[in-house]
Image: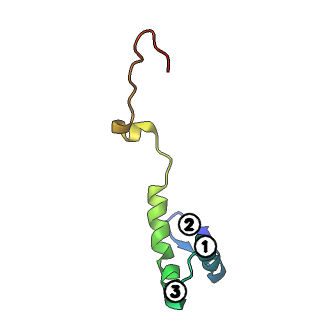
Amino acid sequence: MTTDPNMTATLSDSEVDTLIRRSGLSPDAELRSALHASWTHAAQVTSAVRKPRPHSAEPAHVFALPVPPGQQL
């Protein structure tokens, strides 16, 4: 599997078969062809989403409550 900086990816038929086998799916030939054809789009989406982000990227998820005096966590 190769990925270039423009977020496009290509998979060989054997790589598609390996991914399908690992997923536990048993698609017919038509669905297998559709899965192979949709791979480029899926790679573009996941490369845009799957990036390490610092906590500051989503301030609503970053907070710390003070520990009441005399208590430990």
Q: CA distance from mark 1 to mark 2?
A: 20 Å
Above or below, 22 against 53 in this view is below
Q: Identify the element where label 2 is drawn.
A: loop
Residue at 45% x, 9% y is 70
Q: Amino acid at mark 1?
A: Leu
Q: CA distance from mark 1 to mark 3?
A: 13 Å
Q: Nearer the viewer, mark 3 or mark 2?
A: 3
Q: Residues within 10 Å of mark 2 (few under 14, many from 20)?
A: few
Outermost top residue: 70
Residue at 49% x, 16% y is 72
Q: Nearer the viewer, residue 25 or 46?
A: 25
Q: Nearer the viewer, mark 1 or mark 2?
A: 1
Nearer-N-terminus badge (3/2): 2
Residue 48 in which image quadrant:
bottom left
Residue topped by disc 3: 33
Nearer-N-terminus badge (1/2): 2
In the rendered image, residue 42, in percent from the top left (x then y), is placed at: 47, 69
Left or right, 26 with reference to 66: right
Above or below, 13 against 3 in this view is below
Above or below, 35 against 67 in this view is below
User: Circles 1 and 2: CB distance less than 8 Å?
Assistant: no
Residue topped by disc 2: 4
Residue topped by disc 1: 19
In the rendered image, residue 16, in percent from the top left (x then y), is placed at: 60, 78
Left or right, 15 with reference to 47: right
Q: Quadrant of the N terminus?
A: bottom right
In the rendered image, residue 13, in percent from the top left (x then y), is placed at: 62, 83
Q: Residues within 10 Å of mark 3 (few under 14, many from 20)?
A: few
Q: Identify the element where label 3 is drawn.
A: helix
Residue at 49% x, 55% y is 50
Q: Amino acid at mark 2?
A: Asp
